[in-house]
Amino acid sequence: MVESKELIELAREFRKNPTPAENKLWGYLKNKQLDGPIHNNPDVINNDKKREEYLKENGIIVIHFKNHNIFDNPKKVLKSILYYIEKTKQKVN
């Protein structure tokens, strides 16, 4: 499993080299981690599952979107993100 310091370094590295879809979505979002198409690689999938499990255990919601959804319908992606934010707020209150 990836440790917190390693996770932070990985996130920094990913943000230095974003994909076009990540760039577009970053235009709408701040302080969120976005992943590129490398995560479709079978060798990476197992590590992603472990990382996602770790993030969820630490209260972080993980949402997946395909690149084409970000380009073709960014408003729908943003509405989905807002839905999860509202859902989380309801659980806290």
Image (tube, rainbow, N blue to C red):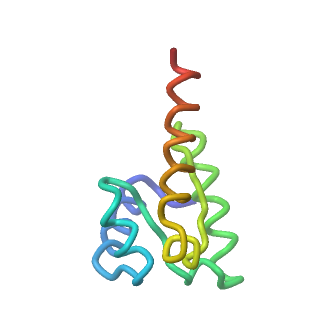
Residue 42 image position (x, y, % from top left): 71, 83
Going 59% across and 66% down the picture, which residue do you hit? Answer: 65
Residue toward you, 58 or 74: 74
Going 59% across and 44% down the picture, which residue do you hit? Answer: 56
Query: Is 57 situated above or below 6?
Result: above
Going 56% across and 41% down the picture, which residue do you hit? Answer: 84
State the quadrant of the N terminus: bottom right
Query: Is 14 situated above or below 19?
Result: above
Residue 81 image position (x, y, % from top left): 51, 49
Residue 19 image position (x, y, % from top left): 41, 83
Quadrant in which residue 39 is drawn: bottom right
55 left or right, relative to 47: left
Residue 10 image position (x, y, % from top left): 39, 69
19 left or right, relative to 69: left
- Outermost residue toward the top in this view: 93
Query: Is 1 situated above or below 12?
Result: above
80 left or right, relative to 13: right
Going 58% across and 32% down the picture, which residue do you hit? Answer: 87
